[in-house]
Image (tube, grey):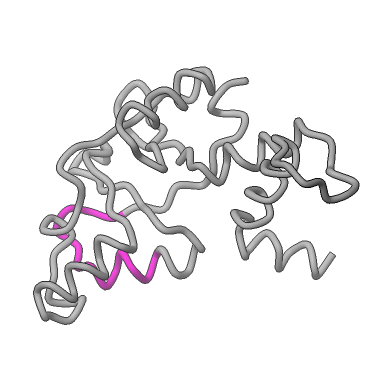
Amino acid sequence: MLVKQIMSQPVVSCQVDDHANLAAQRMWENDCGVIPVLDEEGRAIAMVTDRDICMAAYTQGKLLDQILVSSVMSKGLYACSPDDTLDQAEQLMRDHQVRRLSVVDSTGKPVGILSLNDVACASARNQPRPQSHSDGISSASTAWTLAAVCAHRIAEEHMKLA
């Protein structure tokens, strides 16, 4: 399976010199906990998470519109290509202990996000839905539980309306 088959799209992002308030707003409106930070040419150079923003507000004692994304974003970027295999991407996540990867094209521009949510949902689709509870842990039960917990609220709302 390739990353492009399960990555989340479209990508919501922010710029280095944006305020944390804008990053938080974009995360809230798009039901995501991370967005790539772009340079002037639109290339992904870092990530910023909802936790990064919360901890910055707490530790700096400032309002979000007084905090620049550049002061809270990650120091580096772990990224993969849409044509990488899921195995390659998962290994990168394990090696660097990250829950999300920016998916970038050959020019470094973001085209998606691969998260543990995406991996959990893909895993559940490949497992039979558990029929009954057992005394042990099964990979199918775990995959379905993770997929349910990780489901995007926006997708759930659309399903309820359908």
Give the residue drawn at x 66%, y 36%: 122
Figure quadrant of the N terminus: top right
Does 59 sit left or right of 46 as displayed?
left
Image spot of residue 34 (x, y percent): 37, 54
Image spot of residue 82 (x, y percent): 48, 25
Above or below for 122 versus 130:
above
Name which quarter of the figure residue 137 lies in: top right
Give the residue drawn at x 20%, y 52%: 73
Does 87 sit left or right of 59 as displayed?
right
Give the residue drawn at x 35%, y 39%: 98
Image spot of residue 94 (x, y percent): 39, 29
Name which quarter of the figure residue 22 lies in: bottom left
Give the residues in magenta: 14-26
State the residue in front, 51 or 109. 51
Residue lying furthest front: 135
Q: Is residue 17 magenta?
A: yes
